[in-house]
Image: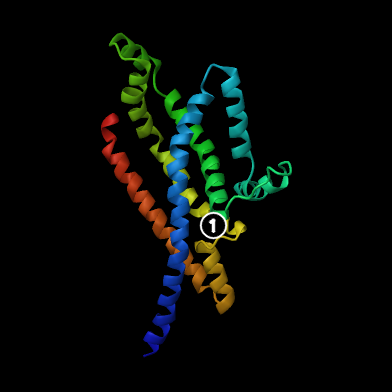
Amino acid sequence: MLIIEYIAPLMKQVILLGTGALTTLRIFFLTLLFSLPLGLLIALARMSPRKWLSAPVKLFILIMRGTPLILQLIFFYFAPAAILPEGLRFTLPRFTAAVLAFSLNYAAYFAEIYRGGIESIPQGQYEAAAVLGFTKSQTFFRIILPQVIKRILPPVSNEVITLVKDSALITVLGISELFRVARNEANRLFSTTPLFIAGLFYLFMNWIVTKVFDAAEKKLSYYR
């Protein structure tokens, strides 16, 4: 009987925190959906010999990597209504502002990872592909990019794991994600148990991420 009395409220907390975890997962998947392809485009622009293209991109990467993500969240939510001229002011929905800030921030990090992977491919492979009659786009997408993906999986997995934990930062915008729900429950119950359960949620999500990337690395092992 005592066990049931203890487990019942515990399961109630798990279910409640599970609703917050759903918001965390939405941020996670939407960020990856936008930032991974955007990061590749930014990397290609960063490597462009055209200064008018590469210079602004370098500045963008510097700003996004050189300022705290929590400040970027605050900026994208509050800035449009504060710094734009009267009549052009608007306020993004909280969740939209969070996805925008996360996507641009992580795209900057992924861009540098992509760039490192692309530049690690020997120049001779480009020359060999040209001799075989491949166009530049065919060379990149059929020969270079598959090898780049294999090489960048470990650093990308690190960023993705960090993304799971960084998702807690959206609490600054008042969004009820996992950490905010856990903190509210901890304050209401005067207990650290909800925070401990939230930690288990984060650990489980990162375990899944680790397993996915391990499987991807094994699948691409033929690129050695």
Farthest residue in the top direction? Answer: 131
Q: Is residue 148 above or below residue 50?
A: below
Q: Quadrant of residue 89?
A: top right
Residue pointed to by mark 1: 168
Where residue 77 appears, as percent x and y from the top left, is: 63, 50
Identity of the residue drawn at 46% across and 68% down: 17
Q: Is residue 129 above or below residue 149?
A: above
Identity of the residue drawn at 56% across and 68% down: 183
Farthest residue in the bottom direction? Answer: 1
Where residue 124 appears, as percent x and y from the top left, is: 36, 14
- Is the C terminus in the top left, top right, bottom left or bottom right quadrant? top left
Identity of the residue drawn at 34% across and 17% down: 125
Q: Residues within 10 Å of mark 1 (few under 14, many from 20)?
A: some
Q: How many marks?
A: 1
For the residue pair 159 and 54, the one nearer the viewer reads as 54
- Is the N terminus in the top left, top right, bottom left or bottom right quadrant? bottom left
Where residue 76 appears, as percent x and y from the top left, is: 62, 46
For the residue pair 48 and 195, the one nearer the viewer reads as 48
Which three-letter amino acid code belongs to the residue tagged 1?
Ala
Where residue 62 appears, as percent x and y from the top left, is: 62, 34
Which secondary structure lies at badge 1? helix
Q: Is residue 129 above or below residue 198?
A: above
Farthest residue in the front direction? Answer: 87
Direction from residue 222 to residue 48 in the image, left or right: right
Q: Is residue 150 above or below residue 207?
A: above
Identity of the residue drawn at 33% across and 48% down: 212
Direction from residue 166 to residue 86 in the image, left or right: right
For the residue pair 33 and 186, the one nearer the viewer reads as 33
Q: How is the image coloured?
A: rainbow
